[in-house]
Image (tube, rainbow, N blue to C red):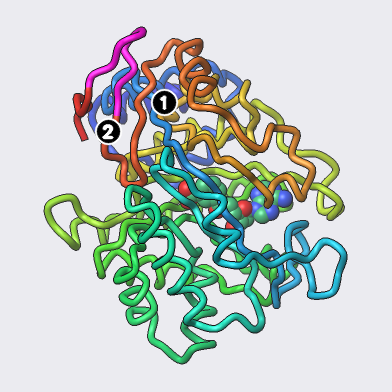
Amino acid sequence: MASILDRVTSKVQQQERLTRDDALELFAVDDAIRLGRLADQVKRARWSDRAHFVINRQINPSNICVLSCRFCDFAAKRGRANAYEMTIQEVLERCNVELREVHIVGGLHPDWKWEYYLEMFRAIQANFPQIQIKAWTAVEIDYFSKKFRLSVEEVLRQFQEVGLVALPGGGAEVFSERVRKALFPFKIGAPRWLEIHRIAHKVGLPTNSTLLYGHMETHEERVDHMLKLRELQDDTRGFTPPRGAGFMSFIPLAYQPGKTQVVARQPSALEDLKTIAIARLLLDNIPHIKAYWVTMGEESASVALHFGADDIDGTIGEERIMHAADAASPVSLTRDHLVELIRESGCTPVERDALYHTIQVYNDHAYCENSVPQ
Ligand code: V47
């Protein structure tokens, strides 16, 4: 009988979709190198040897959060020594003229007013018109909608008016009620997360998607999570022609255990690479698979560019969520460092904006603009 890798190879050649069982069997294969090569072929058919990155900055305006999720080391209660809140001026101080994207997410703050959130974006737009704002997870959008008694559509519409161009993929964790009850019982679950992304796609906001893995979830739960994303993407992609507003990317987030004692250590590099490869093969309708260097580490992220990933996020500037959980990676990387990292892995660095439009292709030491197929 043909092996799972033979069967999946033939499905890939025939452009046939992988099933739940295929993905589960792939998690069990020993030949991770062959799995990676197959995912790399699929990635290359779409993106050639290109690897995307963005000059960006993460800003977490506050870690004060009404929730206390068991897996999270970032959130704090007001009055605790590590609790902080930024003024709009402090948010602006983290922006500069080099940036293409700001990625803004934070705790569910108990008292900030709706106007504060809108004013933050207005100030960024007024001072740095070249910056695209990608902000607020579905968890935050749900919170704003309930707290300020606005529909989700209205929350998104008002943010779009002041510059929001995309939603990040956070807050999805893993779409499993079993895990939710154990690790984040008061946070929205899969149906609401998916509903909010569906609405975002409908109003023309592209979004990202994530999976938090390497804690107590099973491979079945990982695969079911990815399949729910694939299903939503089938439904909503193309809501807004010509580009369509669906998921732009999928980002597997390797869990950093920090002080939570949920697990003793983060997933192995092999587990990270297999998850990237299976995502590339299973998520045939999500264009970008991101190897997030902050959680994977630079070393695994550069290998992941040969296991199906075509993106490594960006310069980041200041990362607080994973570093609150003692992530070993740096908090920031320079553009030159990212370009070198990608080149050393044998790929062509492609600088992009928040919506994956090409800014520069770094061919050897020269570059040409806008030459990557979208
Ligand atoms: O939702 C929290 C995760 C997410 C830990 O959309 C942790 O481009 C690992 O979503 N170890 C927020 N993960 C980060 C996020 C993200 C990051 C980069 C790019 C994009 C994008 C989105 O981080 C949370 C949660 O799933 N998280 N704590 C931890 N200790």
Pick the residue in front: 13 or 323.
Answer: 323
Task: Judge whether 153 appears above or below 121 on screen.
Answer: below
Number of marks drawn: 2
Residue 213 within the segment the image draws in magenta? no
User: Residue 128: horizontal and vertical position, in percent?
Assistant: 38, 52
Label 1 element class = helix
Instruction: Evaluate whether residue 223 shows in this view.
Output: no
User: Residue 282: horizontal and vertical position, in percent?
Assistant: 40, 40
Residue 358 numbered mark, or none: 2
Q: Residue at x 54, y 70 (%)?
A: 139
Circle 1 residues within 10 Å: few <14, some 14–19, many ≥20: many
User: Residue 20: horizontal and vertical position, in percent?
Assistant: 45, 47
Instruction: Evaluate whether residue 18 shows in this view.
Output: yes
Q: Which residues are magenta?
A: 360-368
| Placement of the N terminus among the 4 image quadrants | top left
Please state which amino acid type lies under the numbered disc 2.
Thr
| Image depth: mark 1 or mark 2 in front | 2
Q: Which residue is mark 1?
A: 39
Task: Judge whether 286 appears above or below 333 on screen.
Answer: below
Task: Judge whether 274 appears above or below 75 on screen.
Answer: above
